[in-house]
Image: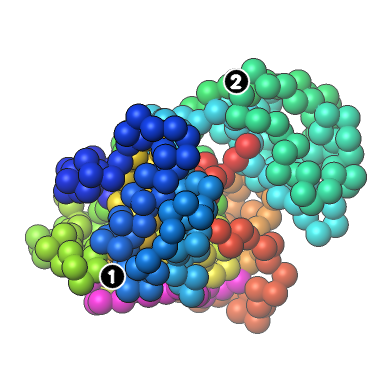
Amino acid sequence: MFQCKKYLIVILSSLLLSCGGSGGGGTDEVIYQQNKFVHELLLDRYLWYTEVDPEIDYANFNSPEETLDFLRYETLDRFSYIADASTFDSLFEDGQYLGYGFSYYKENDGTVPLKFVYDDSPAGRAGLQRGDMIISINRELVEHISTTSWDDVFGPAEEGYPVFLVVQKKNGDRVGINMEKAIVNINTVLAYSVIDNGPDKVGYMAFKSFLGTSDQEFIDVFSLFQTEGVNKMVLDLRYNGGGRVSVAQNLASYMVPTTSSTDLFALLKQNDKHQDLNYSYYFKTMVNELDLDRVVVITSGSTASASEMVINGLKPFVDVKTVGNKTYGKPVGMNPVEFDDKVILPITFATYNQDGEGEYFNGIPYDCFVRDDLNSAFGDPEEGMLAEALVVSQNGLCSATKSAQKSNNERPVETSYSLQAIIGAQ
C-alpha cells in the first residue's frame, strides 16, 4: 500500500535536489549518486532507519537496487523495492502494463492452470479463461520447463514480443493460440454479481488491485448492489496484492455507512523522526454505500498490503470473517519517491485500525480454510471458496468440513514484494 507519490516528492524536495540526478557524470558516477540517494533516503524516512548501516562505500554497489537489498532490515522487510518510473506511473495512474494479460499457477503435479485473465488484453481477446490449462509454451511442454527458465519463458518487456501457447479448455479441447505483448488495460474488478443466499442478498466482488482506475469501476458495482438491496457482502481478495491507500479507504467506506467524522479507517504512522507526517484516513460518505452486518473476505497468501488494510480497518465496525488461507502479512506501506528514471518504494509507515490493531507480519489468519478452486468461474456459488463464504455469510460459522481443515496444502506464494504483486499477471 502506498500514499500518493506527488505528496512525498513535495515533502522531500530538498533531499531530491541534493541527492537525485546524475549530475552529468559517467555511468559509475551516476550509479554512485543513486546509491548515495538510496542510503540517505533510508537513513531519513525508512521505518526501520535505526537498522540501516550508517556508513557504506557507495562504490561497492553496482546499482541502487543492490544498495537497497544490502541495507534493508532483513528481519521484517521483504517489501521495499525499486521499479521503473514509467512502468510504475502507467500501472497506478492509468491501470496499464505491457504484457499478455493472464495469470497462472504452477501446480505440484506439473499442470499450469490459469487463475484469471484481464478482459482488455491479448489473452482476453484470444478467449483465454480462468481454469484453462497451459500445455506448452513456444512448443515446449510445460513439464519440461525448468524452474529457472520460467522467469524468462514469456520473453522481455517488449511490445509485439510473440508467444505461442497450446491450451486445454475445460471441455477437454486443445487449441493453439498466438499472442503478442501489448498494453493491457487492467479491469481491477474481475467479476461482480448479486447472489440470493437464503434470506440474504449477497453482493459478490472479485477485486484484483487498488489502482487509480478502480474508483470508476466501483460506481457500477455498488450501484447494482444498492439497487438489489444487498445486505451482506463477499469481498474476494484472493489475488489482490494491494495498491493505493486512498482506494482502499473508498472501498471500505462503501461497506461502512459513516456515522461520525471520527470513524478511523487507518492510521499511518511514520518513524520517530517524522511523526508530523502521520496521517489518518477516515471513513467517507459514499453514494450507494451499503448497510451491512457482515462482510466475508476471501483471502490467500497473495492477499497483501491495502487488501489487508481493508480487512483490518473494517473489523471495528462490522463483523468480518475470512475464508481461504491466511494473508501475506504486510501491515506497512510506502511513500514512493522518483529519482532519475526510477522510483524507490521503501517502507516508511506502519498501519493501524481504530482499535490500534496492526503489526500482522505473519498474516491475518483465516476463519475457515478453503483451497482455491480453479475449475469454477468467479461468482459461481458452487466454487469452493465462494460456496464456503456464502455459508459463513449466512450464519457466521464455518461449515463442519471446513472448520477441521488446515492450510498445509495451500499453494505457495512469493516471499518478496514488487510491482508484479500488484499486476499479478504476465
Instruction: Report x, y in % for residue 7.
Output: 20, 45
Residue closer to the observer: 74 or 302:
74
Asked if the stretch drawn in magenta spans residue 362, the answer is: yes
> Which residue is found at the position 63% from the left and 66% from the top?
370
Q: Is residue 146 visible?
A: yes
* Viewer-proximal residue among 204 and 32: 32
Within the magenta stretch, is there residue 23?
A: no
Magenta region, residue range: 353-369
Image coords of residue 342 (percent x, y): 41, 38
> Pointer 1: what residue?
352
Q: Residues within 10 Å of mark 1 (few under 14, many from 20)?
A: many
Q: Which one is in front, 212 or 82?
A: 82
| Residue kind at label 1, given as amino acid type | Tyr
Horizontal placement of 224 versus 168: left or right? left
Residue 161, image quadrant: top right
What element does badge 2 sit on? loop
Residue 28's spot in the image, x, y percent? 47, 40
Which residue has dot 2 on it?
159
When the figure is inspected, residue 277 is found, relative to residue 407, above or below; the finding is above
Q: Is residue 307 above or below residue 144?
A: below
